Image: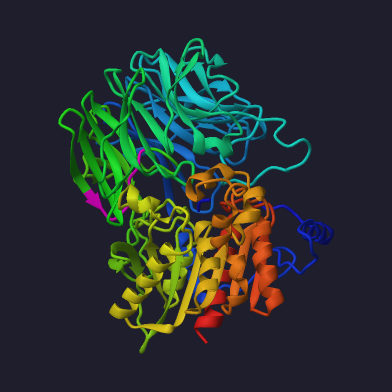
Amino acid sequence: MAGAEWHAMSGDTVEMYATRCGFLLQIILLGLQAQAPPTEAADQLIEQLSRTIVYKDIAVSPDGQRLAWVQSIVGARGGSLHLCDARLGRDASIAITSATQERDDNGPAWSPDSRRVAFISNSGRDGAPQLWLAEAGSRQAAKLADLRGFAERPHWSPDGKRIAFLYVEGAAGGGPLLAAGPQTGVIDAAIHNQRIAVADAASGEVRLVSPADRHVYDFDWSPDGKQFAATAAPGPGDNNWWIAQLYLIRSDSGGTSVIYQPKLQIATPRWSPDGRQIAFIEGLMSDEGFHGGDLYTIGATGGAARNRMPGRQTSASSLVWQTPEQLLFTEYARGGVNISTLDTRADTIEERWHGAEEARVAGNFPNMSVARDGITCGIVRSSFEKPPEVWWGKPGVWQAVTHGNSGLKPTWGESESIEWSSDGQTVQGWLIKPAKRAPGRMPLVVEVHGGPSGSVTPRWPARTSLSELLVSRGYYVLLPNPRGSYGRGEVFTQANVKDFGYGDLRDILAGVDAAIAKYPIDEQRLGITGWSYGGYMTMFAVTQTTRFRAAAAGAGIANWTSYYGENLIDQWMIPFFGATVYEDPEVYARSSPIQFIKRVRTPTLVVVGEQDAECPAPQSFEFWHALRTLGVPTKLVVYPGEGHMFMKPADQRDVATRMLSWFDTYLKQ
């Protein structure tokens, strides 16, 4: 429930799509009707952001002296591998022979001797993945193996003779954020599990290791190279991440055993250097790859797992071992991140660095890598005010390695972390201020993050961003981290279980009051928006209050009862609602916007991707149809071919500019 390409759609196809949802109606689809014209401010900001260089998949060599990353420009599909001597700061793009026009490299991984980098590229015929090797100091790469299907996350064996990676042979992958395939034929008849594959680093021979009946989400080599620690579950993989367990998998035979069954969700298993312990994160998580929770350790043969941070008012997000007794880990804290260390013998935690930015070494969109010494890092740093660059060194004393975005300056105003009280607890959020303050009071739009298990931390907008568009147009923007968010401990993250839309909405409204009390904000010109969980909260908020004079719901959920049977990831719901919808329908109905739909007076724009697997389009149809029937100003936009995460820059731009136009219409007049 977090936070694809366009294809042509004829009028007949649109009519069939509407009929499938039970009614014929007018749908606004790009390509069938003119796009909403962006304002001059939007044009300027979009043009500026399009010049941003994007750095991703950063990897520091084990000796800490070299860096690798994938580099592209905002709006470009894919990217190319770059290698750099971190001490000199000179990088070189790696050349490969590619059969595809759009090169897309990913997952660079250094060999244990820091001399070679393994990476995956879609350079085969028709974009098929290939495994490549590049030598440090060279500008050329050599193909190691042709693959067929989906592959990611190469990881060298400790002896440097093998390369393991995640592989969906003969099928697509990438997770539920991407556009869902056609749901036709015998459903669930063909399950393509993601497995651990191992390539011989000399010959390129590839063999599948993990069992065919298990979908592997993450893994780590044991120090002796004989086993993997892995999180896995039976397929289908997109749905069953929420019930994954901790496995040991033999690297030769593929023999498996379960050593831990978590109470909640589990992520990032990592083996201690002496092979005696495995560390991982466990907590209430609503999205695969967006991790947060408490840090645990368990013996390498199983037994009782130990929570290493009970009651700590932060949320661990990733980890690496420094020594057999000490871990370095990242954690959401106070609206930003900590880099901290855990001494497993003394059972003490020390905060080494705190910043108002992002830092994580695992999960979706990691931006940090740690060398063998457990402290030297490569990291892509950015904030609301500073565009991304690659940095290197020890936390807090990093040195800039790249300067590709040095000419970019924000056209929006300053950001501020603000805190407020709600139901006796402290809640944090970010307020972005307009660069130019007009006389009198100004409008404010609340943007609710996805999740709900997530956190807003400062970052430079890597693609068209509604928040920055709004601020550039003279709005204040509030980005709250209400209960259910990461950053204040597991009790806070779990505080909206069986209570969606109630306590979290009170937190948001209290944040609006706090912003109004401090800044010249017009309480008669308030708006609310969000995507996924944020889209749901937008839908629910307008059924509970008339304070918002305009709303824009992206990929929202109108009816938890029908949603349970429509989405392709229903396992995520049980920890949050306590039971299936069939066992406890009342708890689902209580939080469903459709139950209170006749209360809505707020003009609401509704947008969604046609092939969204996480928050399917019928949910947006249901909400829009009700508002239209009740005479509430509304508009529905369905984007052909898009999934939960929109992939085409033109679509991202259109969503942002349509929402901006919607708020201008109802809050600027």
Rendered position, 188 above or below 452? above
Left or right relative to 542: residue 626: right
Residue 4 visible in the displayed image: no
Residue 279: % across, % down: 32, 29
Residue at left offset 38%, top offset 58% = 483
Residue positioned most to the top: 253
Residue 454: % across, % down: 41, 52
Left or right relative to 99: residue 354: left
Q: Using the rendered view, name the quadrant where residue 393 is placed.
A: top left
Residue at left offset 34%, top offset 64% = 430
* Residue 245 vs residue 463, the one in the foreground: 245
Image colouring: rainbow
Left or right relative to 392: residue 165: right
Residue 506: % across, % down: 40, 68
Residue positioned most to the right: 12
Residue at left offset 82%, top offset 57% = 16
* Residue 335 vs residue 298, the one in the foreground: 298
* Residue 164 vs residue 575, the one in the foreground: 575
Is 662 part of what is drawn in magenta?
no
Q: Please tell me whether the stretch drawn in magenta is mainly helix, strand or loop.
A: loop
Residue at left offset 61%, top offset 74% = 37
Question: Residues in magenta?
Answer: 354-361
